[in-house]
Amino acid sequence: MEALHHKPVYPTGATKWILILTAISCAILELIDTTVVNVSLREISGSIGATTTEIAWVVTAYAISNVIIIPLTSMLSDLFGRKTYFTGSVVLFTFASLMCGLSTNLWMLVFWRFVQGIGGGGLLSTAQSIIVGAFPPEKINTGNAIFGMGIILGPTFGPTLGGYITDNFNWHWIFFINIPIGVVATILAWTYVTDREGAVKPRKIDWWGIIFLAGAVGCLQYVLEEGTSDDWFESTEIIVCSIVSLFCFVAFVIRELRIDYAAVNIRLYKNYNLAMGSIMNFMLGFLLFGTVFIFPLFAQISLGWTPTQTGVFMIPSALCTAISMPIVGKLLSSGKNPKTIIIIGICITFSFLMMMAFSSPDSNQYNFYFPFVLRGVGLAFMMSPILSLAVAGLRGKDMAQAIGLANMIRQLGGAVGIALINVFLINKNAEVRSGMLGYVTDYSNAATDRIAGLVQTFMSKGYSADQAQTMAYQTMEGMVFKQQALVSYDQGFFAVGILILICIPVVFLIRYKKNAKAAVISDH
């Protein structure tokens, strides 16, 4: 039993802020490595001799181990002690980063990315519990705002950092850069992180619960990561993984409800607002990772931006979120209704998506500055109340469990968002292309005039008539491709915007009473 009657002691002064800085730095590092390799996959595949399909495993391996370990962090933290577990996760993450950088073949890199994901998953939820635990209940919104900044900054800075390092050094340094940060974080973690007050070492280890959880979320993550490239249920592997995921999920739920030493306390979902918060967290992951996925494709394919240019452009949006987070935290602390704040955030984010949905071939970065400011502010207004909602009224072990579940659901929301947006774009591209090609025929005066003008242009540059004709058709093909991509991405932004509005009814379902204290849920 946790010491319910013992007044908790919170860190103060420099110790408190060094502890928070250490935890948030580790969380950001973990989230950066979720996306940092995405822009460098081409260079990595060329260096180690992997195909385009094979190199995707570098991303998938990290995502699978990450999402498996996140909900188990509370149990592992109590088993080993929070100080030992967090420091050990930093060490494992840092060593795996070194080995990733030293990898000379695909499967060596994939293995160490899987190990890196195990270490990284241990950092994310434990970091949030450390940060939230550094504040008394009445100031918990400040802790959630600080952690929320990390959630935004990590995925945003990942592609930017990856592109810059790859362009100016080589892909190995994407992983080597973690080492000095990891060494400093290890020293600080061992010095300042403490064990959770009242933590009790589990009497037994729920091995079957861990196995079922790993099968359920691991296979689901694989399906979401690889489904598009494997043509979804046309693939035997996808079908098998889907069946295994469903079976393991059902077995996991039955197992965790029947035993009193569950690896993950899913009884916490008896808390109505925690369940509503999980739905919102899922949509938050969908929005956060989905827009980070769709905008770089849109900017590079339709507008011709470089990866580095795209990544740098997204930084101001993340900074707007970082600036807005403390403001939202103060609004929540002053007693403002979190439902109102979330709805304001949804409306602001919807405005950003609608502006993006009406982009044109003439759009440039100046057209996107204000929409991305709205994105940054909107995410801040959504994120802080949702993070607070997910752990409202919980203490100690219950809070640590809820944090792990919330982070897993947000990561899965991001994976589902990317998968669904990818499917939408593929289908929409085919649909739009089919419609456009109906106008590029010998019977279209506009099309024949454009091709004739291109032929004359190429012939004036010294090309033969046949060469000019071929190049004119190739140029037209490129123009059609850019136009179809632009229309598809515009409709993608529009679809995500409409989907975000679904969150509004969920917000109205949240129960909120000013100055009311939610009941603490017991473990059993």
Image (spheres, helix red, strand yellow):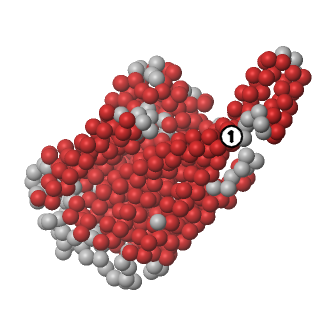
Percent from the top left, x then y, of residue 247? Answer: 21, 47
Q: Residue furthest front?
A: 443
Residue at image coords 39%, 27%:
109
Percent from the top left, x then y, of residue 23? Answer: 39, 53
Label 1 sits on residue: 438
Is 156 left, or right, of 246 in this rendering?
A: right
Residue at image coords 45%, 45%:
419
| Depicted 289 relative to depicted 479: above or below | below
Closer to us: 207 or 475: 475
Residue at image coords 26%, 59%:
401
How many badges with numbers are in the image?
Answer: 1
Closer to us: 36 or 189: 36
Tag 1 secondary structure: loop
Closer to us: 350 or 85: 350
Q: Which quarter shows the N terminus?
A: bottom left
Is 349 left, or right, of 63 in this rendering?
A: right
Is 85 left, or right, of 460 in this rendering?
A: left
**Image quadrant assignment for residue 468:** top right
